[in-house]
């Protein structure tokens, strides 16, 4: 079993910052990609950004220049630094981990339960 736990959500005013953290633990041999998704009320879940083990990151256009993803491979953690937050960033943010349980094993993925970010004055 693999557990994925997010933390750091909350209420912030427009223009403010928040930092989300995610930790993966359990039967993990290697983590390929760690990503952040979000789902706003009434909308589909969307990819916010992701980062591979080598450090290369990808972001959705709407957060480029405002959000930064970083990961610690030794600790199996990933963070999402969110700056210049806007009301439209309000959503439940989910951490996703693509991993394998053994060398050459199939790629699997695991999700956290989500953390709510509310941007409002």
Image: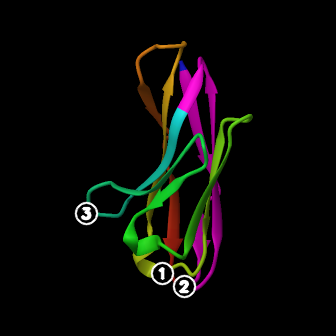
* 48 magenta-colored: no
Residue 42 image label: 3
- The earlier-in-sequence mark between 3 and 1 is 3
CB under 8 Å between discs 2 and 3: no
Q: Residue at label 2?
A: 14
- Where's residue 120, x and y in %? 51, 81
Residue located 59% across and 17% down the image: 27
> With respect to residue 114, does 25 lie above or below?
above
> With respect to residue 62, does 52 lie above or below?
above
Residue located 58% across and 85% down the image: 15
Compare residues 90 and 58 and report the one nearer the observer.
58
Secondary structure beneath disc 1? Answer: loop
Q: Is residue 34 left or right of residue 61?
A: right
- Where's residue 70, x and y in %? 64, 54
Q: Main secondary structure of the magenta part?
A: strand
- The earlier-in-sequence mark between 2 and 3 is 2
Secondary structure beneath disc 2? Answer: loop
Q: Write down the region rendered in magenta.
A: 2-31
- What is the basis of the colouring in this image? rainbow
CB under 8 Å between discs 1 and 2: yes
Q: Residue at label 1?
A: 86
Compare residues 5 and 80 and report the one nearer the observer.
80
Residue located 54% across and 85% down the image: 14
- The earlier-in-sequence mark between 1 and 2 is 2
Instruction: Tell us which disc is closer to us: 3 or 1.
Output: 1
């Amino acid at each position: 079993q693999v557990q994925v736990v997010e933390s750091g959500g909350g209420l912030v005013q427009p223009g403010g910052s928040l930092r989300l953290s995610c930790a993966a633990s359990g039967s993990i041999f290697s983590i390929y990609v760690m990503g952040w998704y979000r789902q706003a009320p009434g909308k589909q879940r969307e990819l916010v950004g992701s980062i591979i083990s080598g450090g290369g990151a990808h972001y959705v256009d709407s957060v480029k220049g405002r959000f930064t993803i970083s990961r610690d491979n030794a600790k199996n953690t990933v963070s999402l630094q969110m700056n210049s937050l806007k009301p439209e960033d309000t959503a439940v943010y989910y951490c996703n981990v693509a991993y394998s349980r053994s060398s050459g094993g199939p790629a699997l993925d695991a999700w956290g339960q989500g953390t709510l970010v509310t941007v409002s004055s």
